[in-house]
């Protein structure tokens, strides 16, 4: 009798221990409970995460996240898991990930040490750098050429801080035109309110490609920064984070990520940079 | 929720300085816009009560235009569209040579928007003064100008002071929209603190408290003025 009790208790301990090891992750628990995974997307972060003509979220980051959804379905054995999309913006994306409104943010967020104090980041699916968009033939090549000119900078972004710091360090006399988003930045440049618009070069290429006459504009300058993008995930959800990173690793190894890159970036004539090619190699960790 | 609170961020340099400069801009823009609104609004409100048809029509058009178009849209129009419609030379001056164009645009747009509301109040204040008083003033030998100055306006202002107080408060709150054209006022500064530190809740709490303090101070001052200027025998007296 005594022995039987011990066996049962021992077995119970083992089962609960195993169950705990599987479900100690807040994000996966939440997804399982609601039978829904919530993806945070951006409405106009082309070509990473934006609404297409049918108002569906699409893009490079969204495509990667849909692969993550497949992996979650397998892991939780929920083939009919619902996918819920929630629009986020640069102001609310970190709080919404931190408070669990979205399970994974799939946009164009730069992974920084400061942001890591509130959220965790996935492996790096893209690397951007800050450069300048100018009118063709303006004679501006680098930040130093902006002396005595005006530059439009998006409010509350990493490029804004970087350019301001560079201007200050070189003691340039530059007028700063703060703009709310990329389309206002382009408006400021095209109406002559500013001589240059500076932000992540990939977004500048996107803006240039979207104008009626792309030849009128040029993306110029040396790379001013190293901005690795990442998917944001609630802090301390290691099981889910590992699942996301494993998905990216598998996509890199199978060449799927490279194919996605070609789909979304080749039409903007942005070739795979050596930095990103190296990042792809480093992330291709084996099973 | 996984959020690491850090209230001390609010008193750390440079963030405290950012909040202070944001508060300064909020106060300057709001007060300048209010002064502008009070002057323009009084003139338009007065024009709306004049006997002449043309003056009334012009006043109605002014109010209809500036009161009904959303302030956010007006800011955008003044900042981005108007300089393109002007002759190239003037547009260039507005865009490039005028120092701090976003600051002046915010004052003008907020002032015009608010002046339409002030005009309606001044107009209704004048209309609320019994008609016999105007007739008596004119019969007593006053010119129309003097009747407005000594009889109608002093009473009208005292009558509409309470609703004006709420518009005065609204100016401070509306000034937050100036951030959309790049003015780093209080709300913009707290957003900036969020983007630098990711401690948005603390920064927004600070801004909320500051707006509340401004509102309470304005209410207090206006209450005092209302009490001292209330019309004897009027409504709303204890």
Image (cartoon, coloured by chain):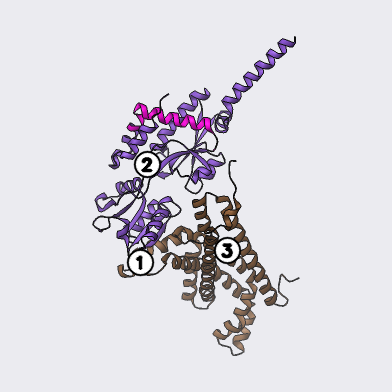
Chain colours: A purple, B brown
Mark 2 or 3: the one toward you? 2
Q: Secondary structure at mark 3?
A: helix
Residue B99 in picture, x, y percent from top left: 40, 69
| Dot 1 or dot 3, earlier in sequence | 1
> Which segment did they paint magenta?
A235-258
Mark 2 belongs to which subunit? Answer: A
Residue A151's spot in the image, x, y percent? 36, 59
Q: Is residue A284 magenta?
A: no
Q: Pointer 3: what residue?
A: B170
In this rendering, is residue A112 above or below B54?
Answer: above
Which residue does the image show at 44% across and 39% down from the upper left?
A230
Residue at mark 2 to residue at mark 3: CA–CA distance? 44 Å
Is disc 2 in contact with disc 3, using a CB cutoff of under 8 Å?
Answer: no
Q: Say whether mark 1 and mark 2 are on the same chain.
A: no
Measure the C-alpha gap from mark 2 to mark 1.
Answer: 34 Å
Measure the C-alpha gap from mark 1 to mark 3.
31 Å
């Amino acid at each position: 009798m005594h022995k039987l009790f011990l066996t049962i208790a021992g077995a119970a301990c083992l089962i609960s221990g195993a169950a705990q090891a599987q479900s100690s992750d807040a994000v996966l628990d939440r997804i399982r409970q609601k039978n829904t995974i919530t993806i945070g997307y951006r409405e106009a972060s082309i070509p990473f995460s934006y609404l297409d003509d049918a108002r569906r979220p699409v893009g490079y980051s969204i495509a990667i996240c849909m692969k993550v959804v497949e992996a979650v379905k397998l892991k939780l054995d929920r083939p009919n898991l619902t996918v819920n999309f929630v629009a986020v913006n640069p102001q609310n994306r970190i709080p919404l990930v931190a408070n669990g409104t979205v399970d994974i943010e799939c946009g164009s967020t730069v992974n920084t040490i400061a942001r890591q104090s509130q959220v965790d980041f996935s492996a790096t699916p893209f690397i951007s750098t800050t450069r300048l968009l100018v009118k063709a033939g303006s004679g501006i090549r680098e930040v130093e050429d902006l002396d005595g000119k005006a530059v439009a900078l998006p409010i509350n972004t990493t490029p804004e801080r970087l350019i301001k710091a560079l201007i200050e360090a070189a003691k340039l006399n530059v007028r700063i035109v703060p703009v709310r988003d990329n389309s206002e930045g382009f408006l400021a440049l095209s109406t002559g309110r500013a001589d240059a618009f500076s932000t992540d070069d990939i977004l500048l290429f996107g803006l240039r490609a979207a104008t009626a006459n792309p030849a009128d504009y040029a993306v110029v300058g040396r790379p001013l920064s190293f901005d690795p993008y990442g998917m944001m995930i609630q802090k301390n959800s290691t099981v889910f984070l590992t699942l996301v990173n494993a998905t990216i690793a598998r996509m890199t190894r199978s060449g799927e990520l490279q194919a996605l890159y070609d789909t979304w970036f080749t039409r903007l004539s942005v070739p795979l940079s050596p930095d990103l090619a190296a990042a792809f190699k480093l992330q291709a960790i084996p099973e | 929720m996984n959020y690491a609170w850090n209230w001390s961020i609010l008193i750390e340099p440079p963030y405290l300085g950012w909040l202070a400069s944001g508060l300064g801009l909020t106060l300057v823009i709001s007060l300048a816009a209010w002064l502008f609104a009070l002057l323009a609004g009084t003139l338009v409100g007065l024009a709306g009560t004049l006997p002449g048809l043309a003056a009334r029509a012009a006043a109605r058009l002014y109010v209809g235009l500036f009161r009904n178009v959303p302030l956010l849209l007006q800011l955008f129009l003044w900042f981005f569209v108007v300089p393109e419609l002007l002759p190239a030379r003037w547009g260039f001056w507005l865009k490039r040579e005028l120092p701090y164009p976003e600051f002046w645009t915010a004052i003008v747009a907020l002032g015009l928007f608010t002046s339409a509301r002030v005009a309606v109040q001044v107009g209704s204040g004048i209309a609320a003064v019994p008609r016999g008083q105007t007739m008596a003033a004119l019969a007593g030998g006053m010119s129309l100008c003097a009747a407005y100055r000594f009889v109608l306006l002093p009473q009208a202002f005292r009558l509409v002071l309470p609703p004006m107080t709420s518009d005065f408060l609204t100016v401070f709150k509306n000034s937050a929209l100036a951030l959309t054209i790049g003015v780093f006022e209080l709300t913009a500064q707290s957003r900036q603190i969020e983007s630098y530190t990711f401690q948005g809740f603390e920064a927004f709490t600070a801004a909320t408290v500051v707006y509340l303090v401004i509102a309470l101070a304005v209410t207090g001052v206006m209450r005092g003025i209302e009490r001292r200027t209330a019309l004897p025998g009027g409504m709303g007296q204890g």
